Image (tube, rainbow, N blue to C red):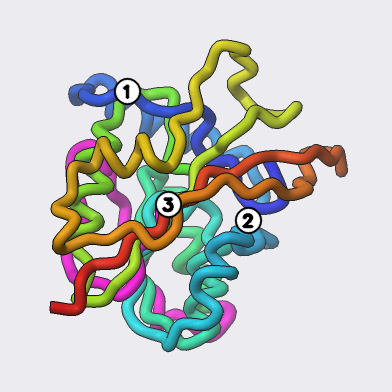
């Protein structure tokens, strides 16, 4: 895990049925059940993107321990936060209440392979939305783009390198470039425009204080204002 979140270890394949969904739920329940609650920081690229924006309605896909959700809500955003783990969702609800931002946070359990939260949003954030289980990721992200309000932003941040502490150490793993991800979404360029597609590097801290330079793949898409 880096200084923020490494919730989803490797890119998920398209497809998957109920058995895979049940396995994924058990896996992430064990993952969050074994972790201490609280203390999660916001992902730096989410902060960089959202800091200059006026508060609105945000959707945090795969919210995990909730660092991004808490950061947004403290700055006046109304946040819908979703995760497959009921433990993660309940902990986030409790943390939001304790911090006095419960009225700004709606935390829901969703297996995104099966369901998607209702609503429309000014910002949708998908930070490291990878999983070792089958997930129709392109379909999920396409749905997220369509849930944007006019002028809204979809921020997708993926792993672009393998950190020493990453769960998947397969040397042959392919990290799709932002342009590849954009192409897979098959969005109408007249209605959704790519405003950022790059691969910044940063210094990250993993378990036990171990540090490494990692690469992120960043894709930022804006829905047309009309």
Query: Which quadrant of the figure has residue 82?
Result: bottom left
Separation of marks 1 and 2 at Cα, in angstroms: 29 Å
Seen at 19% across and 25% down, the residue is 18
Q: Nearer the viewer, mark 1 or mark 2?
A: 1
Q: Quadrant of the N terminus?
A: top right
Closer to the camera: disc 2 or disc 3? 3
Q: Please identify the quadrant where the C terminus is shown.
A: bottom left
Mark nearer the N terminus (2 vs 3)? 2
Q: Nearer the viewer, residue 108 or 223?
A: 223
Are the two marked residues, 1 and 2, in contact with CB atoms closer than 8 angstroms?
no
Q: Which residue is mark 2?
A: 37
Q: How many marks?
A: 3
First in sequence, mark 1 or 2: give its number. 1
Looking at the picture, tell me which residue is in the foreground, 9 or 97.
9
Report whether 18 appears left or right of 203: left
Q: Is residue 21 above or below residue 38?
A: above
Crowd around label 3: few <14 · some 14–19 · many ≥20 (10 Å): many
Q: Which mark is residue 125?
A: none
Q: Which residue is mark 3?
A: 219
Where disc 2 sits, the SS reads loop
Which badge, 3 or 1, is on the more N-terminal residue? 1
Answer whether residue 124 is magenta in the image.
yes
Calculate the distance from the C-alpha at mark 3 to the C-alpha at mark 1: 19 Å
Q: Is residue 86 left or right of residue 38?
A: left
Residue 90 position, x and y percent, is 44, 58
Q: Which residue is mark 1?
A: 13
Q: Is residue 100 visible?
A: yes
Residue 103 drawn above or below residue 50: below
Which residue is pictured at 28% across the width and 29% down the height?
21
Magenta segment: 98-126
In this picture, residue 206 sits left or right of residue 109: right
Q: Secondary structure at mark 1?
A: loop
């Amino acid at each position: 895990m880096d200084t923020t979140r490494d919730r989803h270890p490797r890119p998920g394949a398209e497809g998957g049925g109920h058995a895979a969904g049940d396995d994924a739920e058990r896996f992430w329940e064990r993952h969050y059940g074994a972790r201490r609650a609280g203390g999660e920081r916001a992902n730096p690229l989410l902060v960089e993107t959202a800091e200059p924006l006026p508060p609105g309605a945000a959707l945090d896909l795969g919210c995990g321990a909730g660092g991004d959700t808490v950061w947004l809500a403290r700055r006046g955003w109304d946040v819908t936060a979703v995760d497959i783990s009921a433990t993660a969702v309940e902990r986030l609800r409790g943390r939001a209440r304790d911090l006095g931002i419960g009225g700004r946070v709606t935390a829901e359990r969703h297996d995104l392979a099966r369901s998607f939260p209702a609503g429309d949003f000014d910002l949708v954030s998908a930070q490291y939305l990878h999983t070792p289980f089958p997930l129709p990721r392109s379909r999920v992200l396409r749905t997220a783009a369509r849930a944007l309000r006019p002028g809204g932003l979809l921020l997708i941040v993926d792993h672009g390198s393998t950190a020493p502490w990453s769960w998947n150490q397969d040397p042959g793993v392919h990290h799709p470039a932002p342009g590849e991800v954009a192409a897979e979404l098959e969005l109408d360029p007249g209605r959704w425009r790519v405003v950022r597609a790059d691969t910044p590097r940063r210094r990250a801290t993993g378990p036990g204080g171990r540090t490494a330079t990692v690469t992120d793949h960043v894709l930022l898409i804006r829905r047309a204002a009309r």
